[in-house]
């Protein structure tokens, strides 16, 4: 069990800084260390709650590329434009229509 003396917050800070953009990582590290200086009782849960809340402030999601181009599955394709396979066609099913006719 970890005590307040052997708890190292650096691996947690590094893990939470990973998804951030490179420009925001250093600012996040400084803010996390500052927030940890104000935590009165260090425990794994207290450290995580203090640092995870900060990560949300520094995280900027990447732009959604589908906004301008639309979703890929909505784009026109040959499979969507042509009629369905097996649709009514005068040539389709000729053998089946004549199978039970008396000769």
Image (spheres, grey):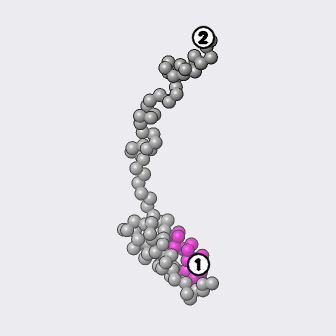
Place of residue 10 in the rendered image (x, y in percent of width and height, measured from the top left): 48, 79
**Position of the N terminus by quadrant:** bottom right
Q: Secondary structure at mark 2?
A: loop
Range of magenta residues = 38-54
**Position of the C terminus by quadrant:** top right
Place of residue 77 in the rendered image (x, y in percent of width and height, measured from the top left): 41, 36
Image height of 2 relative to 54, above or below: below
Q: Residue furthest front?
A: 103
Q: Residue furthest left?
A: 23
The stretch drawn in magenta includes residue 14: no
Image height of 85 relative to 71, above or below: above
| Crowdedness near tag 1: few (<14), some (14–19) or many (≥20) residues, C-alpha within 10 Å | some
Q: Earlier in the sequence, mark 2 or mark 1?
A: 1
Place of residue 14 in the rendered image (x, y in percent of width and height, measured from the top left): 46, 75
Is residue 40 shown to the viewer in this render?
A: no
- How many numbered marks appear? 2
Distance between mark 2 and mark 1 Cα atoms: 87 Å
Query: Residue at 45% of width from left, 64% of height from top?
Result: 59
Q: Which mark is residue 103?
A: 2
Query: Residue at 51% of width from left, 80% of height from top?
Result: 9
Query: Residue at 42% of width from left, 47% of height from top?
Result: 66
Q: Main secondary structure of the magenta part?
A: helix
* Residue 70, quarter of picture: top left
Q: Residue furthest bottom?
A: 5
Give the label, 2 or 1, closer to the camera.
Answer: 2
The stretch drawn in magenta includes residue 50: yes
Is residue 25 shown to the viewer in this render?
A: yes
Image height of 4 relative to 77, above or below: below
Query: Residue at 44% of width from left, 75% of height from top?
Result: 29
Contact between marks 2 and 1 (CB within 8 A): the answer is no
The residue where tag 1 is placed is: 44
């Amino acid at each position: 069990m970890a005590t307040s003396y052997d708890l190292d917050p650096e691996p947690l800070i590094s893990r939470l800084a990973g998804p951030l953009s490179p420009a925001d990582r250093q600012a996040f590290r400084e803010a996390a260390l500052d927030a940890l200086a104000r935590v009165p009782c260090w425990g794994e849960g207290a450290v995580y709650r203090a640092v995870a809340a900060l990560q949300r402030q520094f995280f900027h999601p990447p732009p959604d590329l589908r906004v301008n181009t639309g979703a890929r599955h909505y784009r026109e394709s040959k499979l969507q434009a042509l009629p369905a396979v097996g649709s009514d066609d005068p040539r389709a099913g000729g053998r089946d229509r004549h199978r039970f006719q008396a000769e």
